[in-house]
Amino acid sequence: MDIDMPGMNGIGSTAVVKAISPSIQVVMLTVSEKEDRIFQALRNGATGYMLKKSGRDELVNGPSYKMIAAKHFISTDTVKTHIQGIYRKLHVNSKGEAISLALKRGIAVNRL
């Protein structure tokens, strides 16, 4: 969903979509790099965001557990266990919630 849609913007639309069907995953695709707007979208339930200027590989291939495992010479189960531990310690349930928390706390978010 785009943050700057005509009528109701993507931030408000995300809240409506998540209220109707919480299991739907919403990814913001936007030209906006304004952290406050991205954070609002994440707070309203967006799973994550991508900038429109991102390359095809970034849009299609965010790092999977398999890719992370291969890069670090560990099993995919080990990756999953570590990520679940991180989520548990942060009291979040998804990557989007973890990113939202990091933005809220002013923590830099780096890609794996």
Image (cartoon, rainbow, N blue to C red):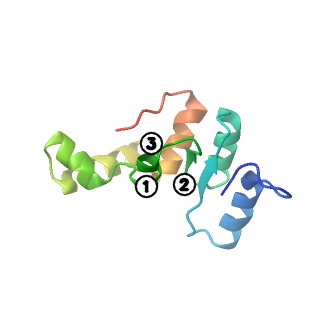
**Residue type at tag 1:** Val
**Residue at figure coordinates x 47%, y 33% from the top left:** 109
| Of marks 3 and 1, the one in the foreground | 1
Determine the secondary structure under disc 1: helix
Q: Which residue is mark 2?
A: 47
For the C terminus, the quadrant is top left
Residue at the spot 15% in from the left edge and 52% down from the top edge: 75
**Residue nearest the observer in this picture, 56 or 93:** 56
Q: Nearer the viewer, residue 18 or 67?
A: 67
| Marker disc for residue 60 | 1
Q: In this view, which residue lies farthest toward the left?
A: 73
Image height of 102 relative to 10, above or below: above
Q: CA distance from mark 3 to mark 1?
A: 27 Å
Please state which amino acid type lies under the numbered disc 3.
Leu
- How far across and how far down the image is residue 72, in percent? 18, 40
2 versus 112 height, above or below: below
Image disc number at residue 75 = none
Label located before the other in sequence (1 or 2):
2
- Residue nearest the viewer, comparing 17 with 32: 32
The earlier-in-sequence mark between 3 and 2 is: 2
Q: Residue furthest bottom?
A: 21
Is 88 on the left or on the right of 68, as rendered?
right
Q: Residues within 10 Å of mark 1 (few under 14, many from 20)?
A: few
Q: Position of residue 51 (x, y in %)?
A: 58, 43
Distance between mark 3 and mark 2 Cα atoms = 16 Å
Q: Determine the CA span between mark 1 and mark 2.
A: 15 Å
Q: Secondary structure at mark 3?
A: helix
- In front: 50, or 82? 50
Q: Which residue carries the number 3 mark?
A: 90
Q: Which quadrant of the structure image shows residue 106?
A: top right
